[in-house]
Every structure is written in structure tokens, then in C-alpha cells.
Image: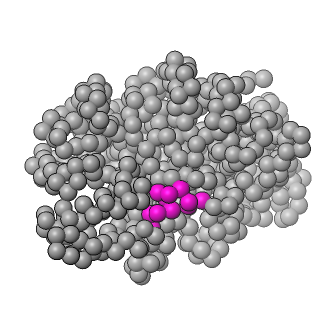
Amino acid sequence: MYRWLILTVAAVPMLLSSFRTATPGLVWWTTHALEKIRPYDSIPADLNKSASVSAARNEFEAFQVVLRSETPISGIDVSLSDFTGPNGAVLSRQNAVVFFEGMLDLKKPSSIEGRPGLWPDPLIPRVDRYSNERRNSFPFDLTADRNQPIWIELYIPTSTTPGSYCGDVAIDVLNRRQVTIPVTLEIWNFTLPSTSSLPTSFGVNGLTAQRQHFGQYTNDDDVLKLTWIYQKALLWHRISVHGAAMAPPPFVRRGDRVEIDWRKYDEEVASFLDGTVFQGNEPLLGARATTIDLRTSGAANTDALKILYWREFARHFREKGWFDRLFNYVWDEPGENDFPAVLRKAQLTRTADPEIRNLVTAPLNPAWKDVIDLWSPLINCFERKAGHHPFCKPMADRDSYRPEEQNGKTLWWYQSCASHGCNTVGGEYFTGWPSYMIDISPVANRIMEWVTWKYGIQGELYFNTTEAFGKQGNPWQEISMFGGNGDGTLLYPGLPSRIGGRTHIPIESVRLKLIREGLEDYEYLHMLSRLGESSLAIEIVNTMVRKTYDFEHDPAKLYSARQRMGEELSRLGAGK
């Protein structure tokens, strides 16, 4: 048996009729998470009939069940059993979420690597993790001759006994069992940290989220409540945010200082920075945000007031123990005409407090060396590729940043429309890059953190996760931004009128799940290196990544590489 997958499915060639059930015409199979099943893809020649999943403690892992029928079928439901393990150990079904994979009709491809048509992306839960409400995604009706994938996500609590577990997936039609799919779960003998070892900062705009959920701005409290749950969604995917409620705390001036009212601001951010967001049996207990952005009140409308405001911000963050994660987002992708203003704004922050870290999304610029602490250039700006477009001025290779790092500076990076083509269907140059687009290889959605580890980059930025929320249209119908399908949008507005239930929640995407998989892959590499196995980590990464724009797209190779890491970490008993 071919055993290279962390999440593999026993592939046994059989006649299609062997997989028919008591419901005439129903066909099913299983597959791993690195396949995007489109409605009219052909039925595989070799159908997989069982799933085998391996994961560390405190890790999420997913697989898919695909259903298809020659005729329409109504009332299909999917559920999981508990998993039984060594010496009577039980992994409860409450640690799993079953998602219906929604389809988006993409009008044109993001690049020549993509295709138009229906693609899976929004994941509507059967029962959500946020309020534990049953939603309307199940039971569902199956359209004739059309694939319907189901995403099944398992979470392994930190207290779980390592070893082999068995459970099953049940497929019911009109409340009658039609299929029972055996699932084997191997839990490795190591534990991933709850807080990401790779700092991240992904954008969230709570104001546009509120407009999508409620149709208009209502009040600040509603923005805070909605933003809180969006931040929770991202932290569950090991991602920290900037922007969020977009509301700087108010202040009054008291002579040569300002007095800030921290009540609502701290209510918004404290649980994320203190590691108290997740409670009880929720996954990733103790997870903390790795970063937070400095806000500026619009009432601080002079340089003198800005200095006093930022100085008080720094004092408060030191007092709370949050200061090491604070940064000032000085400027986003400045053009040459912006360079003087970038320098001036960064210098002003230095005057307020020289230890506030300044970030700019631009390549290394010698004129800013005294005021920039976090360099965050495009991933495109490290190696020249044939047909290079002028995204990077100046171009600076990886080694150019070494002196800055030796002086205590930090190097992040980000990917953007430069990975698929900005406001165009990208051609040959826009192939091979890590990308968060819908119509791209699933490995491309997951590989960014592998590339990040290979190049020794210390953090990842992404401009937004709710960008399409700001449009007049509906993100469920139109998600193309900047020439890319899903650019800047990793979540969907989960309105009760659409998904059922009573509460508003964010709907996660397949791409967000794959980004989290990449962040968990990064933890494997980081743990191997920390345990003295750097040479193995380097060897494994090099099997997957050759250049910033050249990586293996074969899911089997990624799973094989991850299997090697997992087995070695389990042998070492890392992070017990």
C-alpha cells in the first residue's frame, strides 16, 4: 500500500457499482485536503473508500468526502462518530466539524494557471464552533451528475493519548444510514504550540463586515462584537490581525500629556493579547495574537498631539505586557512620490517612542534605515524571474537584509496580485508563485509558509481578509478583486438569513484552512530546527521549494515530506 500521506485514503481499484448504496445511483469517495473538487470533474478511476489521518496534538487536520448521483437525491446528512483509541481512550466527535463546500462561479481566471467556472471555497458548517448552532447546510439535496464535496475537520486536543484511533463517517438519506466510511486516525506523540511561532498580521475591516452583515452601520458596540468574532476566527487559524474595529481609543489632552479612555479598546484586544480568547473545551487554548497595530485617533490632528498619543499608547502597552507585539504600519506600498512622507511619519513615531517598531511594505531603502524596524517587501522582490514586472524598486535580494537583521531589524514579506496579475489575467511571469486565489493549486495556497521558513523570513503580512466586503455587491457572488479571484478575501459573511441559525458568524474558506495547514507545517519545521534537526528540516524543505516562484505542486510530495517530519517529531516526543 502506498503510504506517503499524512492524510491518505486507501486507494483500492474497484468497479463503480461496488460503491453504489441502498439509494440508487449514489456514488461516494474520499480524498485529502489538497484537492479542489469541482462539480463537473470526472469520477476518479480508482475510488477511495476509507480515510486515514495523522496529526499531532493541538493540530487540525482535514479530509474530504465527495458525493455524486445519477439522479437527484434529497435529504442527505453527514456526521461523525467518536474515535476510540488505545486502552479505551476516546476522541469525542465534538472535536470535529463537518462543512458543506459552497461553490463560487468565477467569471474569468486569476491567471493562466486558473480557470473560470464553479470552484469550491466557502465552508458552511453543519454545527458551528462559534455558538454551537445547527446551520442549514445539512441536510442538503444532491443535484444529478454533479460532485458535492464535504470538508471534515478534526482537532486533536492537547490531552489526547497518542496512538491509533478508529471512527467513521455516516452518510444518511432521509434519516436512514446509507454509507459508513471507516476512518483511521494516528495521533503522533508531540504537541503543536497554540500561539504561532511565525508572527502574522492579516487585515480585517470591521466596518465593512458590519455593512455586509447588517446592511449599514448601526453602532460601535455592534462593530466591536462582530470584529471580535472575526478575530477569533482568524486566531483559530493561527493568524493575528491588523485593522479590526478600526476605532482608535478616544483621548483628552491634559497639559503636556494625553489621557486615553482604554475601556472599549481593551475590551476589543485584551483577550487576544493575553491568551484568554478560547475557553473550556475550545481548540487552541492559550493562543495569543503575535502582533497588533498602532492606532491613531483622528482628533490627534497635529504632530504634537500624535506624539503625545503614541507615547501614551506605548506606556499602556508596556504596562499590559503587550509592547513586544506592537508595530506602527507606516505606509502601504509607497510610491517614489511618497518616500519623503514615509520618512517623516516614521521619524515622528521615533520621536514619540524610539522603541515602537515601524513597518513599511517596501523593499530595503537606505534612506529609511534609521527609522524602519520591520521591512515587509513583496515575495517577488527577492529573486528575478524572466519577464519581471516592476513591482520592486529597488530590487534587494535576501542577503541585502542581513546587516539590518544584525542590527536588530526584522524581515517580513507578503504576497499580492503580483502573484497572479494585477487587474489582468496574469501570463507566464505570474505562474509558480505562492497564491491565496481560489482558482489555483491547493498547494499554492499552502506553500507560503514553507517558502517563508526556507528563506528565513520572520513574519507574514496580508493586506486584508474581508476586502470584497467593501464592495456594493455580495461576496458570495462576486469575489474578484485586483484581477484575482479571492484576492484579499478569506472569509464570507455568515448571515443567519443565508446559513440558518440565529447568530452572525464568519464563514471560513478552503483557502483559509490551507493557510493554517501551512502555518502548522511551519511549526513542524521550526520544532525540528529547535530540537537540533535543522539539517533534516532543510533537506525536507528543499524537496518542496526551489525558488520563491518554483515549488512542487504535487500533493503527494507535500504529504510525504510532512509525514517524514511528523514521524521524526513523534520519535523525539517533541512538545510533550
Residue at image x 85%, y 45%?
A: 89
Q: In which quarter of the image is residue 173?
A: bottom right
Residue sticking out furthest to the bottom:
218
Front residue of this view, candidates 216 and 77: 216
Q: Can residue 509 be seen in this view?
A: no
Q: Quadrant of residue 567?
A: top right
Find residue 17 and report its horizontal and vertical position in percent. Answer: 85, 41
Find residue 458 and report its horizontal and vertical position in percent. Answer: 39, 37
Is residue 273 in the magenta section? yes
Apparent side of residue 111 relative to residue 395 in the rendered image (left or right): right
Find residue 500 and report its horizontal and vertical position in percent. Answer: 64, 72
Residue 388 position (above or below residue 177): above
Residue 522 position (above or below residue 529): below
Q: Quadrant of residue 319?
A: bottom left
Q: In which quarter of the image is the N terminus?
A: top right
Residue at image x 47%, y 57%?
A: 273
Q: In which quarter of the image is the C terminus?
A: top right
Which region of the structure is painted magenta?
A: 268-278
Front residue of this view, candidates 276 and 79: 276
Characterize the magenta stretch by its predominant secondary structure: helix
